[in-house]
Amino acid sequence: MIDVVIVDINNFAGMVRDAITGFSGGQLIAQFTRDALGGAIAAIESNEGEVVGIMGDAIFAVVPEGPHIFGACVTMAESVDRSCEYLSNHQREFPQDWDYAPGGFSAKICVEFGWMDISNITTRHLGRQNPLIGPAINYASRIGRAGAGNRCHLGPVAAHKPELSQYSPKGPYTVAGKEGEENYSYYELSFSDIGREDPRTPDDTYWG
């Protein structure tokens, strides 16, 4: 049993579209994505977790059961906030830089806890890969569809674990599943002391 963590950049398809039509002509969008996700990767790895997949603008990670999960979420939120503060300050003098992400980017952190199975698959280019399969992965992905701006959503199992429930996550809320699926319930984990001052985009300011 482990915690599944998905970190995903919001409105990434729109950012790519704007990058191609904007000042940069689409150059360096991959490097921007690398830098945006780099802090989240470091946060997970410094809290006993492992990144097991990168899916375009999102990372998929696992963190062992225990208190490390809250530290990972807080450190990821702080990393996103620092990146946005840097971009926002830089763009005051050079507004054409990263013009597809005015004021920085926003991200969602989604966590659920559960059982998973592991196998392996090999491709000529990637070599041996170890896909993880389990309902917690699907659940974490689904609850990220709710809300806007910077946010941290917990699945119901994760939200009731002592290492997270002690921080009084708000909820439950619900988000509609895909066609044929039931609704998904989730909770919001608030980091009220993390947030930029003077943001360019108010919806992307505060966590929780």
Image (cartoon, rainbow, N blue to C red):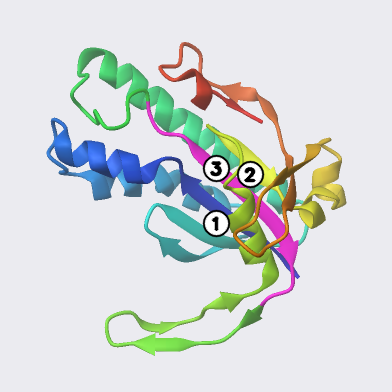
Q: Which residue is mark 2?
A: 73
Q: Residues within 10 Å of mark 2 (few under 14, many from 20)?
A: many
Residue 74 seen in this snapshot: no
Could you tell which of marks 1 and 3 lies nearer the N-terminus? 1
**Magenta stretch in the rendered image:** 104-116
Q: CA distance from mark 3 to mark 2?
A: 10 Å
Quick check: is 108 in the magenta stretch?
A: yes
Residue 26 seen in this snapshot: yes
Query: Is 70 above or below relative to 125?
Result: above
Q: Secondary structure at mark 2?
A: helix
Q: Which residue is mark 3?
A: 108
Query: Is 51 above or below relative to 154?
Result: below
Q: Which residue is mark 1?
A: 45
Query: Where, quadrant-wise, is the N terminus in this rendering?
Result: bottom right
Q: Amino acid at mark 1?
A: Glu
Quick check: is 105 in the magenta stretch?
A: yes
